[in-house]
Image: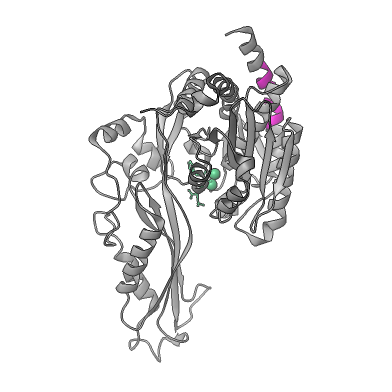
Amino acid sequence: MSLGAEALAAGIAARQRSLVEGLKSWVEIPSISTEPARKADVQRSAEFLRDYALKCGMTTAEVWPTEGHPTVFAERLEDPSWPTVLVYGHHDVQPVDPIEEWEAAPFQPLERDGLLLGRGTADDKGHLLMHLETVRGILDTRGRLPINLKLIAEGEEEDGSDHFEATVRSHRERLRSDVAVISDTSMLAEDVPGLTVALRGMAYWEVRVRSSRTDLHSGVYGGAVLNPIAILADMLAGLHDARGRVQVPGFYDAVRELSAGERQELAQVPFDEGGFLSEVGAIAGGEAGYTLMERRTTRPTLEICGIWGGYQGEGAKTVIPARAAAKLSSRLVPDQGAAQITKLVGDHLRQAAPPGVEVEFELIHDGRWVETPTSHPAVDAAALAVASVWGRDPVFIREGGSIPPVATIADELQVPCVLFGVGLPGDHIHAPNERVVLRQLFRGMQALGLLWDAYSELGIDGLGVRPG
Ligand code: BES
Ligand code: MN
Ligand code: MN
C-alpha cells in the first residue's frame, strides 16, 4: 500500500466510532413511513440526516418535501471536470411488530458483540451513515474528495416510493451524475463479499370480495347463501397448481428464461439451501423444476401476504360476514411489466368468483425489476474495491427483494447503477431484532474510499464507456 493509501485507510478507520454513535442517535427516531402517526418522526429523521450530512462535510444539504414523506438531498461539488457520483439510500424504516419478539427495544439501539441491534440499523440508516462517515474520513485526511458527491435519501421506500419519480423529475438537474451507487442490499456472508446485479420488481394488490349487503345470522341464513370467506379461499387456492406454477393465464409469457450458462453461473454462487431454510424454520415451497436460488431470485412469484374476514375477537359470534379480503403481491422478473400482470391477475380473480359476487381489485404499489451489467467500468471498479478490502473477489448476486427507486434512477437520470450494500442474510431486516454487523459497515467505508479514487482515475469519459 502506498503512503497515501495507508493514510487514507487510517483516516477512514478513525471514523468508525462516530459512525456507530451517529447511527445509535438516528435509530432512536422511529421513521416508520407506513404509519401515519409517525409522520413527524419521518420529518425529524430527514432533518437529522440533513444536519449529519453537513457535519460530515457535505456543503449543501436540504430536506425536499414531497406529497408524502420528505427526501434528503446533500452534495459536495469539488470540480466540474471530475466524475459525479449519486448515492441512493432511504431513511424510513419498517414497522416493528411483533414487538414482543424483540430482545431490546427497537428504537433503543443496543451494541453487542460487534453488532448494532435496532430497527433501521441495516435497512437502511447504517448504509447512509457509512457513506457520510467515509466522506468525513476522506476530508479529515486529504481535505477534499476525489469526485463530486451527491446523496439522495428517500423517506418512503418502505411504503412504495409513491413520490420518488416526481421528486427525481423535478430535480433532474441537481441530480445529474455520471454513476449512481445504491447502498441498500446485502452480501452472502461476511467472508463472501458480493455485488448485486439484479433485483426483482413487484406489484402489490388488495382484493375484496362481497357477497351480501350486510352480515348475516349464521343460523337464519347459514346453508342457504354463499360465504365470502369460502369464495375468497377458493379464488386464492386456485392461483397455483400442486407444482407451484401460477395458474393465471399469461403470467409467464414475458418471462425471459435464463440460458443454461446463466443457470450454471447461478448454481456456482455459494448458497446453503438447508441453512437458508433452517435458520428461520421455513419449509421449501415454490415452483418445481427450479433450484431454491432460482425460485427466490429469477422466477416470478404470486404470494398471499394477508387475509381477513369475519369475526376475529374472542369467543364465538354466529355470523356469516358480508365481506372478505386479502393482500397479494408478485415479484416480477425481466421482462414482466407490473401493469400487464396487474391486469392478468385482476381478470383472473374476477372470473374465478361466482356470478353476482362483487370483487374489487386494487393496485397498492408497484416497481420495475432491475438488471445491471456485470462488465461495466463502474461495476468493475466496485468489484476491485470490494476484493481488495474483503480479500476475495465478490460474487454477483441476483437479489429476490425489490428496490423500485433504482429503476427510476436508471431511467430518469440515464446513469449506470452500482448496487453496493454490506447487509448480510442474518440481519433480520423487516423482522424483530434487526441488526447490522459493524465490521461490514467498516469494511464498506474502506471500499468506498478506494472506489471514489478509482472513479476519479477513470474520469467522466472512462466511466461512461459501455462495453460492446
Ligand atoms: N433493502 C430492501 C430490499 C432488499 C431486501 C435488498 C433484501 C436486499 C436484500 C428494501 O428496503 C425493501 O424492503 N424493499 C421492499 C420494496 C417494497 C416495499 C416496495 C421489498 O423488497 O419488499
Ligand atoms: Mn432498504
Ligand atoms: Mn426494506
Coordinates of residue 271 in the picture (x, y in percent) = 37, 33
- Depth check: give the residue in front, 41 or 113: 41
| Residue 468 percent location from the top left of the image | 35, 28
Q: Is residue 296 left or right of residue 100?
A: left
Q: Is residue 442 left or right of residue 222?
A: right
250 sits left or right of 444 in the view: left
Please identify the quarter of the rendering in which residue 79 is found: top right
Using the image, determine if residue 221 lies above or below residue 317: below
Taking the spot 49% from the left edge, 36% from the top edge, the residue there is 417
Q: Does the magenta stretch include residue 13?
A: yes
* Horizontal arrangement in the rendering, residue 304 relative to residue 166 (left or right): left
Over which residues does the magenta segment extend?
10-19
Vertical order, 303 against 89 (above or below): below
Q: Residue shown at 55%/51% (left/top)? A: 165
* Farthest bottom residue in view: 220
Q: Residue 153 in the image: state x and y as whole percent.
A: 63, 43
Q: Nearer the viewer, residue 116 or 329?
A: 329
- Visible in this render: residue 354? yes
Question: Who's the residue at 50% across and 26% down the image?
Answer: 463
Which is the main secondary structure of the residues drawn in magenta? helix
User: In the rendered structure, does residue 268 fall within the stretch colored magenta?
Assistant: no
User: Taking 64 as reference, is 251 above or below it?
Assistant: below
Tell how many labels.
0
Q: Which of 367 and 96 is in front in this view?
A: 367
Residue 125 at least partly seen: no
Vertical position of residue 60 compared to residue 244: above or below: above
The image position of residue 445, as x and y in percent, is 60, 26
User: In what quadrant of the picture does the N terminus appear?
Assistant: top right
Indicate how the structure is coloured in the image. one colour
